[in-house]
Image: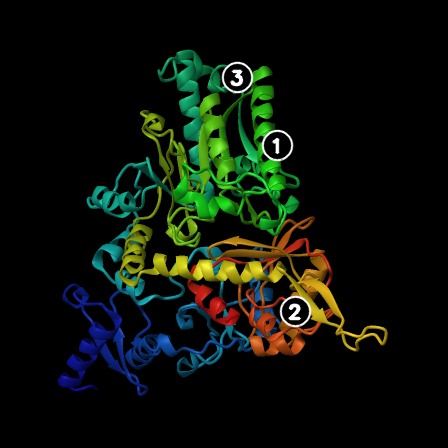
Amino acid sequence: MESKDNKVHCIKDWRNHCAIKNVHKQFRLTVHDTGTGASVRLPYTSKPINIRSMLASRVNHQLAGVEVINVDMKTAVPGPKSKALLKEMTKHQMSSSVRVFVDFEKSFGNWLSDPSLDSSLIFDQVDVDGNRLLDVYTQISSLPLGYNHPALVKAATSPEFITSLVSRPALGSFPRSDWPEKINSVFQPIAPKGLHNVQTMLCGTSANENAIKTAFIWYMAQRRGGKGPDAVALESSMKQQLPGTPKLAVLGFQGAFHGRSLCMLSVTRSKAIHKVDIPAFDWPIARFPRYKYPLNENEGYGIDSTDQATAPYDYQFSQAFNAKEDKECLADVERLIDEWKAKDHDVAAVIVEPIQSEGGDHYGSPAFFRGLRDLTKKKGVVFIVDEVQTGGGAANGQIWAHSHWNLKEPADIVTFSKKLLTGGFYFADHLKVNEGYRIYNTWMGDPTKLMLLEQVLNVYKKDGLLERAKVIGEEFQKNLASFQGPTIYNLQRPTPRWCRIPFFVPLKAHSSLVQNPRGLGTFAAIDFETAEKRDKFVDKAAEKRDKVGHPVGSALRRLRRSRAALPTLARLRQEASGPHVPTAREDRQVALGALFCKAAPRKFKYVLSVRCSNAAPYLVEAMK
């Protein structure tokens, strides 16, 4: 049995290194000698927590500044242990989308960890089969600070967090007493310009779903002169008949992804597998711009001299072909709104993503989005900006990607989730629903997520992460753009006998390897010719004990294959080949971790992309 002094020392270490702080005053801690180091047993837990192991874990975490930054692949992905776990899981769950099993207790920063490894090897090997993976997607872009950030671990030990977790409140009816203050202190400082009302939800899909419901409720209220539903509307709605069940529509865009619920699938056009066999609403789908790259080779729009604030960003989109795309897509939106109104099936809302992420990394210009906002205002249609994928700081050092548009009037609704941890939406004053239970579910969000988000935003500010993301994003995009231009001249060897001077062949930089490099901040993508060639390339990288990622996007046209990790540059360079030997400058610019492969196709239409801002420093370093 431990001595009294040792017991006190253990509890002190527990408090100092695990940030329990005042919890020891409220909960009794019992110390045990297990033979492998002192352990602490918390009330309501049956398994002692080994202090030595926990302290070693914390010490390793404190060494994050010198953590290993090399990917090391021991097996194929998934490896034999992941396959065994998947086989067991499949007995009782639908698990065909599972890629690899991870030990989250041993994962820190951007590194995924292996549950089969000893804690002393946390930063040496990762994943269940011993593979070390640099995660550039961090759980589908939902962990803004990476794995097990100390500020979030500390927040999770507070009494408020524990009681919110154990006794989760139904926020729509019985919120915590500190909920109004949290809503004000966390959400107001990051509110989109012109919006201060906010409604929390469970996830991105439920945020979009309830944003659309809010738009429908407002639109019908306008038909009734601003009044709520009358008895006739209430009675007919129970029979799903007019006027209580109106014919209304939401306009979405080709390539869009807004969620997998029945409603959201009706405005989603990213992957057929999401939609097949599922009934859908008869709602219009408009064209979304598909630009030619490089952008600076397609002349056109020019910069509005009165709009100097966004001039550098607008200049990218100042080209004729792309300007024509904007005009034609806006004309398509207006045509569809008018057509649906003519057949008494009004478009009540337009929903759009700043970047079509799931649909293949498609971008719209600020001019396009400003035109879209003006059009919705003109038609009396609610303008919904879906920032579920883009909100949270990855879009060039701004919390909101749509802040680059410089709208004259704010959007009506902005939805969010993922990197902001909780789902929800900001909305304009005129959209506030007065009747209870119309925008409602059991939980209406999660207070623990708001507590974590509060700490995330504090870390953003304390460590200057948004400013850093902006600098890294600009450097990243500058190097990315150099992949496809300007024209370079390659020395042809051997020089033909008839030529008295060295024979140079004009080539685009990496033109046979890369097409359409594009992005905003740490959002970035390149195109492959086919999904098969892209997959073959990624699998080849994995075979060389490197990992690039896995598929996301349309199975028919554009695909991304990168969510997990990045291969080591030295091994990529060994694999480098193409129509010419890369120069030293070219060889340094391996932005997405893998742009060279044998038998590289000339044209790329399938996308390899990177998404995570806190992994971007590794990528920028790779490009130097």
Considering depth in this image, is 216 or 1 the residue closer to the camera?
A: 216
Q: Secondary structure at mark 2?
A: loop
Q: Residue at label 3?
A: 241
Residue 366 placed where, x, y %? 48, 40
Considering depth in this image, is 215 or 529 the residue closer to the camera?
A: 529
Locate residue 549: give its quadrant.
Answer: bottom right
User: Quarter holding the N terminus?
Assistant: bottom left
* Tag in front: 2 or 3: 2
Q: Residue at label 2?
A: 596
Residue 475 placed where, x, y %? 47, 62
Q: Earlier in the sequence, mark 2 or mark 3?
A: 3
Q: Secondary structure at mark 3?
A: loop
Residue 409 placed where, x, y %? 38, 31
Image point 50% across, 71% down: which residue?
624
Image point 53% across, 37% down: which residue?
264
Res 388 visible:
no
Which mark, by number, is residue 23? Answer: none
Residue 237 lies left or right of residue 12; in this view the side is right
Q: Residues within 10 Å of mark 1 (few under 14, many from 20)?
A: some
User: What's the CA distance linking mark 2 and mark 3?
Assistant: 59 Å
Mark count = 3
Q: Residues within 10 Å of mark 2 (few under 14, many from 20)?
A: many
Which amino acid type corresponds to the residue marked 1 in the rendered image? Glu
Q: Residue at label 1?
A: 328
Which amino acid type corresponds to the residue marked 3 in the rendered image? Gln
Looking at the picture, the colour scheme in use is: rainbow
